[in-house]
Image (spheres, grey):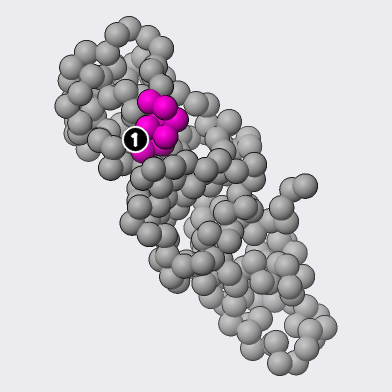
Amino acid sequence: MLSDPAAAAWRAAGQPTVEGPPPTLGKCGRCGATDLTVASSRIVSEFFTGFEAWPYGSRRLCVPCTWGYTNRPADAKPLLITTDTVTEYSDASHLCEVLTAGALPANSAVVVPAFNKLRRRHHILPTTQWAHLATDTLLFPWDTGAAQRLADLAWLRHSVGASWSQLQRAAPEPKLITTRPHQSWPRILTAWTQLQPWRRIPPLWDAARSLTAPPKP
């Protein structure tokens, strides 16, 4: 089902085949396509906990969905997926400009792996949806409000100079405000407060950290 971001990524990669027994006709448990499929036991371990996210009941996967599970979660890269292209980035900060520009359009999806590689334990690509940011254990709709919050966070980190440890707190330290021009105080307080909902969602807050980190040389 090539309208799906994971399948679009497979197509952009040149429609690679997957290792294992030859696929046979069946219904994909993840995307619902009736196509050549592979038994999921050949792809995911017996400890896989994501079956409840497969809405079509089958324990089989079509080739595009199978391919989405073939890369180790620890090796995941930040991605911008469209219906025609996949752009891979060395680190998530390069996606900040895309995500602060506004809502993701209906033909785009973004993958942001966990900031700490040791926490990359889940396959993200198969969970992607158009107009959403996908990260470890979370799929988040990317609307204009999300874009503004991320822009506020980037401004607080890069222009105001707030450290990540400071940003964990519900309110900024007085010294952080008073060392800035007086006219910027209301904006700092407003931006800081607007981030509070994200602080309560650890995977999203972690993704925001990656997206607003200083770019690696």
In the image: residue 56, left or right of residue 13? left
Q: From what the image shows, is residue 30 above or below residue 108?
A: above
The residue at which mark 1 appears reads as 7
| Residue at x 77% of width, y 47% of height | 217
- Comparing 128 with 1, the one in front is 1
| Quarter containing the N terminus | top left
Q: Secondary structure at mark 1?
A: helix
Q: How many marks?
A: 1
Q: Is residue 42 above or below residue 69?
A: above
What percent of the width, then of the height, locates residue 215?
Answer: 71, 53
Residue 205 among magenta residues:
no
From where the camera sits, is residue 135 visible?
Answer: no
Q: Nearer the viewer, residue 174 or 161?
A: 161
Q: In x, y percent, where is residue 57?
A: 19, 30
Q: Residue at x 69, y 56 (%)?
A: 213
Q: Horizontal and vertical percent for residue 17?
A: 38, 18
